[in-house]
């Protein structure tokens, strides 16, 4: 049985999450400090994000459980796949897996952005039947292929370009699964094309669910395809719910490193510089995700993804700081048992699981180090501070609002982070601009958006923040 103090603590944490949808959140008081009110007016000018309940029900990708598809039998041939964003981080790691396990995976189609040199090397090695690249790079790729005729030995892939080319790669007839590694809303259209073609989605594009969930999930249900999460936290949850009975999932616990400012006092954040925010305590990552880790917005976005993936109420999704980043996330079952997925921080493992599910593939100890509990040492946890991480309240409120609000949240954050990285705004201004964008979107919120609505409001949010910060806005195709 839980102690009285534990029950009181749990109730306080749940109440904090519930209030995120209705409280006034003051991002900067008149003294310049970050603070959060508890439902009452506070010093400074409060900015409110109002969450509106929606009558539109979005079907979860995996409503509390995951089971082996009926009639499934172990594969005896390599699974044919296509990769969107093959020259990026997710794409190259996926190809690393394919290189190591040719008996399990076969690359049929590749889509790249502008990196012709790397795409050419991938073509030589994996010999896909179809490749796509940006329209302004088609001539350069064709010339490179012609110059490499001897190396290719008479083989040459079909070359397509632009958004239509990405959609062709995503929906290539002979593939069973498509890895979506394209960043931003640019990945939505090809993902939709893959779903309509009946391909399972190995999901590494956040916008697919955060912005596109209300459109993409009903479409996935209609076409009977699986959405398999490649993000480490959501892969951990997916692994933990394998075989759970209906009603067995009670609570989701997302772990977070705490980012660069994990051990900083709140009062010091007003002076935080870009160089400070980029000092992640655990990993060397890209700039944008490192800033999102510092603000904890990455975890706020993952809360929204968890809601869409598993159908769990926002009241039952928690964030906990776990400095060692060994436990990648946890689920609590109906009987209060807690299941966790542990492993060294390595993005290849969740990618491998999305590719191989429902099977498990034996990996080499040389290239996939096994978890050593003695070397791992202590595992510690702490409650995240809402004053240090106001992004949590903003994200929970946006998630409860649903519809196009979550896409606005993500796009506004991306634009605000860019402005901070360019030293056009201060660190605390990130929260201010994101919340103002969500606030400004309330009257235009679409609860059951079309794909066009999603792309439109993604661009609107970027324009809104760019106008405030003086940053350049990338145009979504």
Image (cartoon, helix red, strand yellow):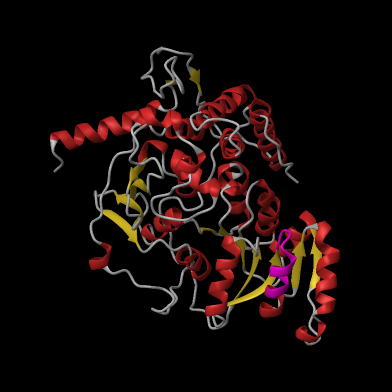
Q: Quadrant of residue 139?
A: bottom right
Q: Give me the residue at 59% from left, 67% from top.
A: 92
Task: Report the magenta residues as a range.
Answer: 112-121
Q: Decide: is 98 above or below 402.
A: below
On the question of residue 390 being in view, the answer is: no
Q: Give me the residue at 24% from left, 61% from top.
A: 377
Locate residue 233, reporting x and y percent.
43, 53
Q: Give me the residue at 46% from left, 21% from top.
A: 28
| Residue nearest the observer in this picture, 289 or 440 | 289
Q: Give me the residue at 69% from left, 74% from top.
A: 121
Locate residue 172, reporting x and y percent.
72, 67
Q: Decide: is 36 above or below 106.
A: above
Q: Is residue 117 magenta?
A: yes
Locate residue 232, reporting x and y percent.
45, 57
Q: Quadrant of residue 77?
A: bottom right
Name the quarter where the N terminus is drawn: top left
On the question of residue 468 being in view, the answer is: yes
Judge left or right: residue 185 versus residue 230: right
């Amino acid at each position: 049985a839980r102690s009285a103090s534990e029950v009181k603590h749990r109730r306080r944490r749940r109440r904090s999450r519930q209030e995120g949808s209705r409280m006034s959140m003051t991002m900067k008081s008149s003294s310049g400090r970050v603070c959060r009110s508890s439902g009452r007016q506070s010093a400074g000018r409060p900015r409110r994000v109002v969450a509106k309940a929606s009558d539109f029900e979005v079907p979860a990708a995996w409503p509390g459980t995951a089971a082996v598809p009926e009639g499934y039998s172990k594969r005896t041939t390599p699974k044919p796949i296509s990769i969107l964003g093959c020259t990026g981080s997710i794409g190259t790691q996926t190809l690393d897996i394919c290189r190591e396990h040719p008996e399990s995976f076969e690359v049929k189609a590749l889509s790249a952005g502008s990196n012709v040199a790397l795409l050419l090397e991938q073509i030589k090695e994996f010999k896909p039947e179809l490749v796509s690249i940006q329209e302004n790079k088609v001539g350069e790729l064709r010339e490179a292929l012609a110059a490499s005729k001897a190396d290719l030995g008479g083989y040459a892939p079909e070359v397509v370009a632009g958004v239509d080319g990405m959609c062709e790669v995503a929906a290539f007839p002979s593939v069973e699964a498509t890895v979506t590694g394209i960043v931003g809303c640019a990945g939505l259209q090809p993902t939709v094309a893959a779903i309509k073609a009946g391909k399972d989605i190995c999901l590494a594009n956040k916008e697919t669910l955060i912005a596109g969930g209300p459109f993409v999930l009903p479409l996935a249900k209609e076409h009977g395809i699986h959405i398999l999460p490649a993000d480490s936290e959501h892969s951990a949850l997916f692994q933990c719910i394998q075989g759970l009975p209906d009603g067995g999932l009670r609570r989701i616990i997302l772990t977070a490193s705490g980012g660069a400012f994990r051990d900083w006092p709140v009062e010091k954040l007003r002076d935080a510089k870009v160089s400070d925010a980029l000092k992640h305590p655990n990993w060397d990552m890209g700039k944008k995700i490192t800033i999102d880790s510092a603000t904890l917005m990455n975890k706020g976005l993952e809360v929204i993804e968890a809601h869409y993936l598993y159908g769990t109420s926002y009241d039952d999704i928690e964030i906990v700081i776990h400095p060692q980043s060994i436990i990648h996330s946890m689920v609590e079952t109906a009987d209060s048992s807690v299941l966790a997925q542990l492993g060294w921080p390595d993005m290849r493992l969740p990618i491998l699981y999305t590719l191989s599910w429902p099977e498990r593939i034996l990996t080499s100890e040389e290239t996939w180090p096994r978890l050593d509990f003695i070397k791992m040492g202590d595992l510690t946890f702490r409650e995240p501070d809402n004053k240090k991480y106001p992004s949590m309240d903003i994200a929970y409120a946006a998630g409860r609002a649903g519809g196009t609000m979550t896409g606005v949240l993500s796009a506004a954050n991306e634009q605000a982070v860019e402005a901070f990285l360019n030293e056009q705004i201060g660190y605390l201004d990130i929260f201010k601009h994101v919340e103002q964008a969500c606030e400004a979107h309330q009257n235009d919120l679409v609860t059951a958006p079309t794909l066009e609505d999603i792309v439109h409001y993604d661009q609107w949010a970027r324009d809104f923040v760019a106008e405030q910060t003086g940053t350049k806005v990338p145009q979504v195709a």
